[in-house]
């Protein structure tokens, strides 16, 4: 049996006519950059995230970059963030000449440890970028309290977590601004790259709108130097269709995650994801831990099961960031997660028979390892 890590064709098959109809509308309108479809998506996403404003941009990476630019982050500044996340969380900081300062993670949730983040706030701290990893929000209240005490804005990298909730509040509405990604593998994924900034700060939203269009409010007149980062109408049209199904898809992911939690429980050497009681996860990824991760991954792939490592190298140990002076042992929990984590198929269309096959192969692997060690 072959089990894909993610099957976008299955999703498309269920909404093919809706997507094609929406794309035809854009083609007939001949309005491809920003415009009514993007504005409608901005309104829908802002409402969904509990924010007053949303600004469509070209990618989740650009969303982070634009918020940092709008907040004036630059050379000599420090930005506290996590080392266990996708690369662009930190590269957006360094592109502006600022320094990412890495706080280790909570090993149960993979999100930044609030106490460690608070301890790194200093006189050069210009912002904190908190990542809501794998579909679960970080523990925001203590982070917000520590940052507020120093007058430091908190940016939410919610690129993997649209629809997640923290104590009843939507991801993206908790800090100064939230950053979303519409990369195809996300729960709300487009037909290519896309992203959005959500915020309730009207002035910040207005400035980001300027920055996304080369820094000009009026065509050919530029107030500041910005970038070219506008959301396409074709992407917005497809995303508006998908938003109608998003909560149903979240429920499907949670249903599959709950099934895994029940059927993988008690397997020697396998740890299933922990979701805090005050959180509602959307399980963009279902990540288990195993001290035999590499061997388990090889066994699953040989058995036809799609699985992936997110992420094999923590950011403080990436070669391009060597100039920052990071060393092995600086963030031990992030480093351990990089050695032990493995994502399994959890997408909502996953057939029960395939889900059962995944669990059976993990049980088989664990039994073989136990038997081998007993000899």
Image (cartoon, helix red, strand yellow):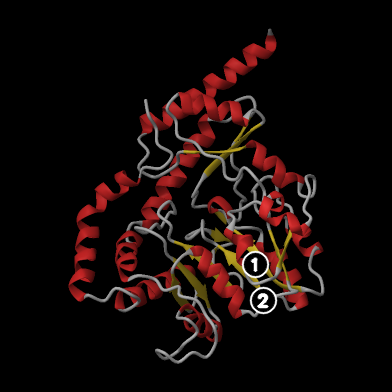
* Relative side of 119 to 200, left or right: right
* Relative side of 88 to 332, left or right: left
Is 11 rendered above or below residue 115? above
Percent x, y for residue 141?
A: 68, 65
Contact (CB < 8 A) between labels 1 and 2? yes
Q: Is residue 176 visible?
A: no
Task: Answer few, some or many: residues within 10 Å of disc 2's Cα (few below 14, many 20 plus, some between 14 and 19).
Answer: many
Label 2: state its secondary structure.
Answer: loop
| Foreground pick, 358 / 231 | 231
Q: Is residue 256 visible?
A: yes
Q: Which mark is residue 93?
A: 1
Residue at the spot 61% in from the left edge and 71% down from the top edge: 175
Percent x, y for residue 219?
A: 39, 89
Q: Quadrant of residue 187?
A: bottom left
Is 342 rendered above or below residue 129? above
Q: The C terminus is located in which quarter?
A: top right
Label 1: state its secondary structure.
Answer: helix
Is 147 rendered above or below residue 239? below
| Foreground pick, 347 / 82 | 82
Q: Residue at label 2?
A: 73
Residue at the spot 47% in from the left edge and 60% down from the top edge: 163
Percent x, y for residue 342?
A: 57, 37
Task: Answer few, some or many: residues within 10 Å of disc 1's Cα (few below 14, many 20 plus, some between 14 and 19).
Answer: many
Residue at the spot 40% in from the left edge and 74% down from the top edge: 42
Q: Which mark is residue 173?
A: none
Specify which label sits upstream in the sequence, 1 or 2.
2
Q: How many marks on residues? A: 2
């Amino acid at each position: 049996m072959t089990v894909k890590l993610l099957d976008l064709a299955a999703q498309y098959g269920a909404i093919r006519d809706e997507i094609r109809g929406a794309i035809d509308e854009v083609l007939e309108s001949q309005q491809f950059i920003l415009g009514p479809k993007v504005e409608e998506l901005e309104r829908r996403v802002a409402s969904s995230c509990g924010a007053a404003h949303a600004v469509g941009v070209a990618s989740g990476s650009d969303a982070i970059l634009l918020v940092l630019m709008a907040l004036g982050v630059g050379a000599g500044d420090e930005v506290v963030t996590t080392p266990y996340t996708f690369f662009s969380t930190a590269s957006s900081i360094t592109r502006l000449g600022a320094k990412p300062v890495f706080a280790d993670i909570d090993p149960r949730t993979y999100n930044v440890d609030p106490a460690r983040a608070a301890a790194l706030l200093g006189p050069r701290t210009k912002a904190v970028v908190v990542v809501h990893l794998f579909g679960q929000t970080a523990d925001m209240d203590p982070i917000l309290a520590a940052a507020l005490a120093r007058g430091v804005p908190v940016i939410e990298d919610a690129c993997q977590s649209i629809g997640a909730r923290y104590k009843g509040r939507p991801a993206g509405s908790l800090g100064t601004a939230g950053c979303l990604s519409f990369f195809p593998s996300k729960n709300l994924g487009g037909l290519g790259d896309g992203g959005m900034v959500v915020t309730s700060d009207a002035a910040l939203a207005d400035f980001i709108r300027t920055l996304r269009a080369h820094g000009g409010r009026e065509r050919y007149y530029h107030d500041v130097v910005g970038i070219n980062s506008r959301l396409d109408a074709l992407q917005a049209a497809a995303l508006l269709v998908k938003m109608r199904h998003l909560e149903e898809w979240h429920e499907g992911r949670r249903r599959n995650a709950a099934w895994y939690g029940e059927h993988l429980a008690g397997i020697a050497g396998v740890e299933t994801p922990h979701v805090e009681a005050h959180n509602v996860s959307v399980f963009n990824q279902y990540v288990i831990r195993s001290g035999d991760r590499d061997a388990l991954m090889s066994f699953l792939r040989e058995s036809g099961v799609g699985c992936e490592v997110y992420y094999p190298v923590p950011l403080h140990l990436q070669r391009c960031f060597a100039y920052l002076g990071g060393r092995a042992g600086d963030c031990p929990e992030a480093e351990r997660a990089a050695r032990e984590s493995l994502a399994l198929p959890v997408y909502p269309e996953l057939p029960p028979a395939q889900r059962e096959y995944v669990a059976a192969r993990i049980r088989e692997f664990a039994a073989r390892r136990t038997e081998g060690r007993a000899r």
